[in-house]
Image: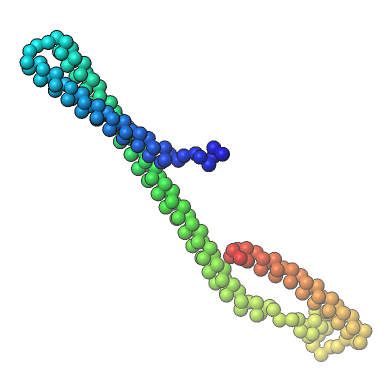
Amino acid sequence: MALFNKKSELEKNAEEISVVNGRIADAQSHMIDLTKIREGIELELTLGADSALEKRLKKLTAAEEKTKKDIAELQERLSQLHQAIADEEARQRKAQVAEAGKAHENAVFEAYRAIMIRQEMEKLLPMFDNVSGLVEPAELKRMAGLGYGESLDSSDEADLIAARNKAEEAGRERAEKEAQEVVSKLRKAIGL
């Protein structure tokens, strides 16, 4: 459960600022009291010299100096805490800006990648028209070694038709498989 109660550096510094401000207020109040007492002793000393009063005056002056030093140290610590908070807030803002920049970079990348792929696909579309037609029977005869005007006898023609059907089925299956792989890679590339 300690993980959920962990305070951030900003929270710790803010709490310490509150504590330091309280200590400064107490020290300043104490300083006011010391000053009033010192002024009272100084007033008594104007009526006549008294070694006990002079001793108390020295102690009060030393206490005032120590309190002034304590207040200065507390104010220095307060300044350090304010600077630490300002530094942490600046670091957090820089991190947010960097994170926003990275998110924007990714969004731009996704958009431009899709645009670039689309442009390239549009360039390829005319090429598909040139290679997507089925093989004509005349082309099949030429592949079988027959010239223009030559014909097959009926048994050879049946073998050629069976070979054509088998080749078309195998070619279609291979093309479908490869096309699915290409489409799958394309979808992955544009984030679909």
118 displayed left or right of 180 = left
Who's the residue at 49% across and 57% down the image? 103
Who's the residue at 70% across and 66% down the image? 181
The spot of residue 185 in percent (x, y) is: 65, 64
Q: Residue furthest bottom?
A: 149
Depth check: give the residue in front, 127 or 62.
Answer: 62
Q: Quadrant for residue 81, please give it.
A: top left
Who's the residue at 25% across and 26% down the image? 30
92 displayed left or right of 191 = left
136 displayed left or right of 9 = right
Q: Residue furthest top?
A: 51
Q: Residue furthest left?
A: 47
Depth check: give the residue in front, 26 or 164.
Answer: 26
The spot of residue 94 in percent (x, y) is: 41, 48
Whether residue 76 is visible to the viewer of this picture, yes or no, is no
- Assign the C terminus to one quadrant of the image: bottom right
Q: Residue furthest right?
A: 155
Does residue 167 sit above or below 12 in this rendering?
Answer: below
Does residue 35 sit above or below 153 in this rendering?
Answer: above
